[in-house]
Amino acid sequence: MRTATNLIAILAVGAVLGLIGRSIRSIPEPAGPGPDDIVHTPDVAPGEKPLVDASQIANDEVAHPPEDEAWLSRFELTERSGKLVNSEDLLGAPYVVSFFFTRCPSICVQQNQKLKELQDKFAGQAVKFIAISVDPENDTPQRMREYAARFGADEDQWLFLTGDLLYTRRIGAEIFQQPVDKQFHTEKFALVDVDGKIEGFYEWPNEKQFKKLEEAIEKQLGDH
């Protein structure tokens, strides 16, 4: 009798363990990025070492909502000239927004070369290019003037802006719908229309999208 009882107990325990094992195996593995997903990584070219380690770019500040505006709808930053530029100043003409930092070893250089192409194509026309720094501690107006000179950036058409990092993070997320952080940004240009509304986002490394951006700028200029 005792042997039969022990056998039943062993079988019951085995059945329970089997159910637990099957339930664990049935939990799906987290899905990784798909072939069409864009994974944003630090701006380091293949084979290069990161400019700084993770501890150097960590942000310890605690974000608090502003007292006067729950969600940003405008911005004001310092241009490389030292003058303040705000979003109201840009109304009436389309403009292209990008995020960058001057010490970026690779991606930012390529990105600003694409902006140089746009500046050359639309030289003298009523479109502006707005490059916002995500490394304000290092990107002083003087440093940005030196950096802008490398690309022959027209001081009236191609603006380089900087400001408090926490504020810049909010500008990226709340106005231009892009995640930005210290020395981190996307590979997207945001095209803003004459009324200050975002017309679209364009991945500049994608030649087809870059061509569409040129066409969208031409349309904006033609409509006004």
Image (tube, grey):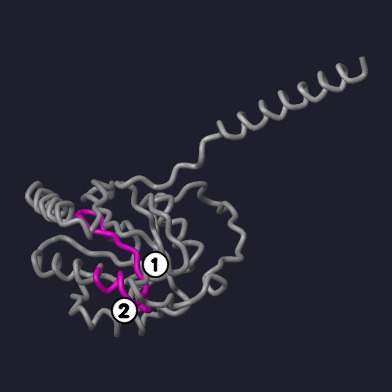
* Disc 1 packing (10 Å; few <14; some 14–19; many ≥20): some
Can residue 124 be seen here? The reply is no
Residue stretch in magenta = 90-110
Q: Mark 1 and mark 2: span between their CA atoms?
A: 11 Å
Q: Which mark is residue 193?
A: none
Three-letter code, disc 1: Leu
Can residue 220 be seen here? The reply is yes
- In this figure, which residue is indicated by the disc labeled 1? 77
| Percent coordinates x, y for residue 131 in the rendering | 30, 67
Q: Image quarter for residue 98? A: bottom left
> Relative to residue 59, is residue 31 depicted above or below?
above
Residue at 61% in and 66% down: 60
- In this figure, which residue is indicated by the disc labeled 2? 81
Q: Secondary structure at mark 1?
A: strand
Q: Horizontal placement of 219 versus 172: left or right?
A: left
Q: Image quarter for residue 123? A: bottom left
104 drawn magenta: yes
